[in-house]
Every structure is written in structure tokens, then in C-alpha cells.
Amino acid sequence: MLPAIDPQMNFYFPVTKKRVSSAALPALFLVFVIVSGAFAQQRVSRHYPAGKNVRIELKNLSGTITVESWARDEIRITATMDKPAVHFNPRQTDTGLVVDIVADNRDRRDVGDVNFRIQVPSRSSVDLETRSGQITVSNIQGDLVRAHVWTSGDITLSGVNAARVFASNTTGNIFFDGEFASGGTYEFKSGRGTITLQLPANCGFHLMATAPAQKIKMGDFWNTGMKLLGEGRRITGDVGDGRASVTVTNYQGDIKFLRR
Amino acid sequence: MNCQNYQNLLSDFIDGSLTPEDHRDVAAHINACGVCTETRNDLDAINGFCLEHRGEYEAVPNERALWLRISNMIEAELPARVPSAIPANAGWWFRLMNRSWQLSFPQLAATAAAIIIVVSIFAVVGSRGFSGIGGYRASGLAPSLGSGNVKERYRSQQEVIAYWNERVEMNKARWNPQMRETFDKNMSVIDAAVNDSMRQLTQNPHDEVSEEILNAALNDKVELLKEFAAL
């Protein structure tokens, strides 16, 4: 129960009505500092030198991951942690940087959310994974973009122009706005949620899309050469030159193609 | 003793075959050591799974042929027996079995050819008989697997899922409520996909799309369980 304050700045507890001496003020302040410290988020930021074609791997337990490009040849990782005692030990490798919150905190029971903001050179490859939480990747043009949410969390990939893109979750939406490179491989998979692919009108790819009947909306990308299989639960066929390979699977949700 | 020594005793500890002193010693160490507790839990889980599934095994296609091959290999390892004299009153089967076979190359080739012909005839007759029983083949673009295979694969996947599920259940108590809720919610999404595919396959056993979704959903379920079993 919260204490009441009288004009003389003495604290009263309404139930007991006993007077708390002014000597207790520093003690109360100390308690307040300790309690607020325990609930405060901890923010850690680190910089790493990087070439233009760097690879970053991140395995998180829970929390958001935001990756965006910037004009510098270095990586900056900012981690905001719910629990101050979370171990966060990025490891530099020959090809880039590995952050594994799962391995770093294997013996801990409750790690809480760790939210990442990562800035990388635009030609970087990113391999991101989390048990739950949203993943956002913007303006990356490296070889690989992989975003995997084991359970719930939206995935947003915008301005992505990579040769290989893999995005999957169990619950949550997947949004891709980018281009398909000729000969590239693109896979999108969700259990429940909408998968939206926003593409330029002139893109070319071979498609295999699978979802419950009536839930695949090809929009302007539909053409008469496409085949409907399994009572409309699968659409296969080429769009344009058909040189990129695109596989989209949704167990329960919709698949939508939009022209940019 | 270090952890390695204690872990060497864990199997006997679980079986209850240690001396009372050793048992007390190991129990005290397990209480104090997280790594050994986890090893003991893993051994317990494996032990429990084996006990629960005792007697269940994948039957080999021709069990008798397999045992004959094993028997032949064992006999080949044994020192050659001195051919014993065949008693005068022995039956024809005994005489046949105790006869020493020495075949020339043409005889051997003729025997092999005869075996190939007989096996081919049985294979053709057998496959026609199988088609006759099924009475229907998918008219899809690619040959589809029979529903028996799907059910068999489903059953074997379920065993794997049961194993990992048990491990997840053991660890679930340590998770926070939010994690438990998220896991259960997402598992129900995959279960819905599995059930939906099974329902479609019951209606149309040669539906390739449903079969692929079923396989993918079962694999996803195993992967999700494995991932969370490590938590």
C-alpha cells in the first residue's frame, strides 16, 4: 500500500497510522533506487570494423531484431535488454560477426526480451533467428537474407535485393518488398498469417505457391500459363523469364502478390 | 570423484544396482551438480521411452530370409565341419541338407538364371496382385505414394514426436508463462495443418499437395520440439 504524505513531509501508512520518522527517508530512497534499477532496461552498443561483404549471424531468444544498412564500413549493434544480467558476447569470425544469445545464456532460466538494432554495410549477408519476436530488415543487398521466427513474430523485409532470401515463422505476417535476382532462390513460409510479396512489374520467377484453397491472390502476376493443382491449393508457373525460384507456403493464411 | 566418474555410475544408479553407499554418494552429487542432473534426466527419458516402446519394432520385409542370411554368415565364420557319414536310415531331407554341393561354372550360371527367372515371375505376379487390391492409381502428374506409406511415415514420425514431446514436457516447468503460452499456441497451428492434411488424405489418399504439406508440417513440428527441448 502506498504511503500518504502530510504537509510536514512525514510518511503515514493509512492502515497502521504510525508515523515514520524522517530518518527513514534515505532508506526509502535507497529502496526506490534499487527497485527501479532492477526494472530498468540495459542498453549496450558495440562497433566492429567490417568489409563491404560481411556476414552477420544472430540467434536471439525473444525480442525484436532490426537490421538496416548504412554508409559506413562497420557494424554497430545496439542491444536493449530487459534483464541487466543477460550475457551478450558478440564473436568476430573470418567472415563477420556471430551473436548467439541462446548459447551465451544457456544456463539462465529467464532471459527476457533482448531487442537488437543492427547497422551494417548494404552488401552484407544477414542470418537472423529468434524464438519469438519481430524481425525487420531494410535495404540489404548482400548474398543472403534469412529471417526465421520459431514461433510468433512478424517478418518485414523491405528494399531487399539478395540472391537468396528465406523468411519463415509459425504465427505472424511476412512482408517482402524487393527484387528477385536472376538465378536466385526465395522461400517464404508461414503457419498462420499473411505472406505479402510486393514486386516490380518486370520481375521474372518460377513460382510454387501453396496455401488453403482460394487463399492465393496472384493479382497482376497471374497468367494463363500457370497451373492450379490440388483443388486450387497450389499454383505453379512462370512469371516473366522465370529465372528466379520462388517457393511460398502458408498452412492456414493468405498469400498475396502486389505490384510495386 | 569428478563428474565423469559419477556419470559412469548413472546407469547403475537408475537401475538401482549400486551399493547403498555409492547410491547415497551419487544422489548427493546429483543434487549439487546441474550437469549431472541433466544427464540423469536424459538417461531417465531414454530409459522411459525404451520401456514404453518395448516390443515395438519395424518388421523387416522378409524376416525368415534375414535370419537365414545371419545364420549363413555365422556358419561361414565357424571352422569347416568334417562331413559325417549319412546314416542308412536317414530321410531324404536329411540327405539333401547334408550333401556337399560342388557345382561347375555352367551349373552355377544355370542355377543363377533359374533363380532370377523365378524371382522375376514372383515379382510380376506380386505387383499385379498389389495393383488389383488397390484398384486405383493416381492420375496426377507424378506417381503418388499409397496411403499405407503415408500412414506408416505418419506413425514413425509420431514416435519421434512423442520422444521430443516428452523432453519438452520435462523442461516446460522451467519456462515462464509467456513462453509456455507462445509455444502451445504455435504448436496448435502446426497441429491444425497436420490434421487438415490428414483429413484431406483420408478423402483423397493420392493428393500430392496434402501429402507434401503433411510431411512439411510434421517436420516443422519435430524441429520446433527439438528447439524448445533444449530450453
Image (cartoon, helix red, strand yellow):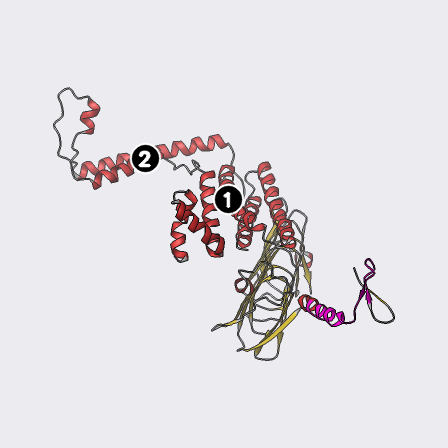
- The image shows residue B96, relative to residue A92, as above or below, that is above
**Left or right, residue A161 beside residue A21:** left
Magenta stretch encompasses residue A25:
yes
- The verdict on a common chain for dots 1 and 2 is yes
Label 1 crowd (10 A; few <14 / some 14-19 / many >=20): some
Name which of mark 1 and mark 2 comes first in the sequence. Answer: 2
In the picture of the structure, the residue carrying the numbered disc 1 is B157
Q: Position of residue B184 (x, y in %)?
A: 63, 49
Magenta stretch encompasses residue B220:
no
Of the 4 image quadrants, the one containing the C terminus of chain B is: bottom right
Identify the residue at image location x=55%, y=53%: B228
Nearer to us: label 1 or label 2? 1
Q: Position of residue B154 (x, y in %)?
A: 52, 41
- The image shows residue B155, relative to residue A136, as above or below, that is above
The residue at the far right in this view is A7
Of the 4 image quadrants, the one containing the N terminus of chain B is: bottom left
Q: Amino acid at mark 2?
A: Ala
| Viewer-side residue, A162 vs B216 | B216
Based on the displayed image, in which of its 4 quarters is residue A63 positioned? bottom right
Numbered disc 1: secondary structure: helix
| Viewer-side residue, A68 vs A34 | A34
The residue at the far top in this view is B89
Based on the displayed image, in which of its 4 quarters is residue A178 positioned? bottom right
Identify the residue at image location x=57%, y=79%: A73
In the picture of the structure, the residue carrying the numbered disc 2 is B65
Q: Chain of mark 1?
A: B
What distance separates the C-alpha of mark 1 from that of mark 2?
28 Å
| Viewer-side residue, A65 vs B17 | B17
Q: Amino acid at mark 1?
A: Gln
| Range drawn in magenta | A11-34
Residue A2 has which mark?
none
